[in-house]
Image (spheres, rainbow, N blue to C red):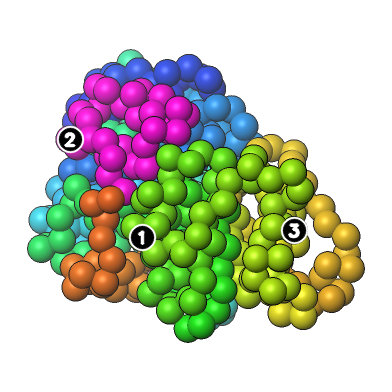
């Protein structure tokens, strides 16, 4: 099989820093495309998998799922993409044909779910290798590499005018947050919203809530350094749970005359998920779980919280169907409906990608963007 070389950051083992390697990359097979990445964001989910907490984590792998780039080659039978197209790889594909895609109820296409979860391309093999050893794919995207191969159904074509070094953030974080508000929760003008966790996801929820016309947006984090950005993006008040001697849900309920219309958990902490549910208004308040909790974690609350009208739901990639709906998010960004610059607190070459993880763990970054 013909191969090319690509530089990539390899996660050899859980808990170890990534290692920059030159890998062999097999050219795209039937229904696949080769993408030259221009930029990739580093999301908490990459750190989660690298930590070993992800039950689906497979090593060695090329992580990364928040990228943007240019199509360099198409495999046999690819009809919807051509060389030179500007694209965002999708960890939530859209085949348009499976039961899930046809349901009109979800963005969770299942066409390649099994192999993607195993770190493999749909034919059950990897395209990356090092000295003959297979290196696994991650979330079907593997954007921590100069070049990657992805299935055609996992690629969104976007306008060529879009700045790839910024719209890469629409490959995960920003779309996830805005979409959770507009698609999953369907927040309406005049609603009240509480956002738990002010990383890339939570700040994007704030943007979504502002776009929806929420009258009150309560931003909650234990790191007060996040509050300035939260206010700049539209938060009307900021709370640090550590500053109170009672549960934060009680503080929010008192502050909002009975609770918020919608809350969003953007951390992955099951105790905070409970707070997020319980700060919702009796009778109608809805809480959306976005954060991904560690292996084996479970959520709990008193069932009476649900009996009395609160609703718990979840959201993946903001409920957005990548191929048909992500281009619209790129256009909304280009039209100035929201900005991305505030999110990009750090940029670096691939060689310095471990710094991106350090900054995230230290609470010093919103998004680090690796430029190729
Ligand atoms: P991040 O690390 O940048 O931000 C998390 C924020 O939570 C930080 O500001 C941190 O200070 C805050 N925090 C931590 N513990 C807290 C607590 N007890 N109370 C209040 N605030 C607390 O992470 P991110 O990239 O924004 O991702 C957030 C979560 O969303 C992660 O779990 C990630 O895996 C998940 N995620 C989910 C989806 C999806 O589609 N559902 C997509 C992307 C990311
Ligand atoms: O269809 O069963 C499935 C899995 C879909 C993957 C959705 C992942 C969303 C949460 C992970 C965070 C993404 C960065
Ligand atoms: Zn992500
Ligand atoms: Zn499908």
Q: Which mark is residue 250?
A: 3
Residue mark closest to the camera, 1 vs 2: 1
* Residue hosting label 1: 233
Q: Is residue 104 magenta?
A: no
Residue at mark 1 to residue at mark 3: CA–CA distance: 25 Å
Secondary structure under the numbered disc 3 in the rendered image: helix
Query: Does the beta carbon of the residue at mark 1 sit less than 8 Å from ligand 1?
Result: no
Which percent across, then down, holds residue 194?
58, 63
**CA neighbours of label 3 inside 10 A, class few (<14), some (14 to 19), many (20+):** some
* Residue hosting label 2: 372
Q: For residue 134, which quarter of the picture?
A: top left
**CA neighbours of label 2 inside 10 A, class few (<14), some (14 to 19), many (20+):** some
Q: In the rendered view of the protein, which quadrant contains the N terminus?
A: top left
Q: Is there CB contact under 8 Å for labels 1 and 2?
A: no
Residue mark closest to the camera, 1 vs 3: 3
User: Does residue 189 appear in this view?
Assistant: yes
Q: Residue at x 83, y 57 (%)?
A: 301
Which percent across, then down, holds residue 145?
27, 33
Reply above or below: 137 against 292: above
Residue at mark 1 to residue at mark 2: CA–CA distance: 29 Å
User: Does residue 71 appear in this view?
Assistant: no
Q: Nearer the viewer, residue 201 or 75?
A: 201
Q: Nearer the viewer, residue 9 or 182?
A: 182
Which percent across, then down, holds residue 168?
27, 51
Q: Magenta segment range?
A: 343-372
């Amino acid at each position: 099989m013909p191969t090319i070389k690509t530089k990539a950051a390899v996660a050899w083992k859980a808990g170890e820093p990534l290692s920059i390697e030159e890998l062999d990359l097999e050219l795209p097979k039937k229904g696949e495309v080769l993408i030259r990445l221009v930029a990739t964001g580093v999301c908490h989910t990459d750190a989660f998998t690298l930590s070993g907490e992800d039950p689906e984590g497979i090593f060695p792998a090329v992580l990364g799922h928040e990228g943007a780039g240019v199509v360099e080659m198409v495999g046999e039978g690819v009809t919807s993409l051509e060389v030179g197209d500007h694209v965002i790889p999708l960890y939530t594909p859209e085949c348009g044909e499976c039961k899930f895609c046809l349901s009109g109820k979800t963005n969770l296409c299942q066409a390649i779910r099994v192999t993607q979860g195993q770190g493999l391309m749909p034919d059950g093999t990897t395209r990356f290798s090092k000295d003959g050893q297979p290196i696994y794919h991650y979330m079907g995207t593997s954007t921590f590499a100069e070049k990657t191969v992805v299935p055609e159904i996992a690629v969104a074509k976007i306008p060529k005018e879009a700045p790839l070094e910024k719209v890469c953030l629409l490959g995960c974080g920003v779309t996830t947050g805005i979409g959770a508000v507009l698609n999953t929760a369907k927040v309406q003008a005049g609603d009240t919203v509480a956002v738990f966790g002010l990383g890339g996801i939570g700040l994007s929820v704030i943007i979504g809530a502002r776009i929806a016309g929420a009258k009150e947006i309560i931003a909650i984090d234990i790191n007060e350094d996040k509050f300035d950005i939260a206010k700049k993006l539209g938060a009307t008040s900021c709370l640090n749970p550590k500053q109170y001697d009672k549960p934060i849900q009680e503080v929010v309920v008192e502050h909002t005359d009975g609770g918020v219309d919608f809350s969003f958990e953007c951390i992955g902490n099951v105790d905070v998920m409970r707070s997020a549910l319980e700060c919702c208004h009796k009778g109608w308040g809805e809480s959306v779980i976005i954060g991904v909790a560690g292996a084996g974690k479970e959520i709990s609350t008193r069932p009476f919280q649900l009996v009395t009208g609160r609703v718990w739901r979840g959201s993946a990639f903001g409920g957005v169907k990548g191929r048909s709906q992500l281009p619209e998010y790129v256009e909304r960004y280009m039209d100035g409906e929201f900005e991305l610059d505030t999110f990009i607190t750090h940029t670096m070459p691939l060689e310095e990608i471990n710094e991106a993880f350090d900054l995230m763990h230290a609470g010093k970054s919103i998004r680090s963007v690796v430029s190729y």
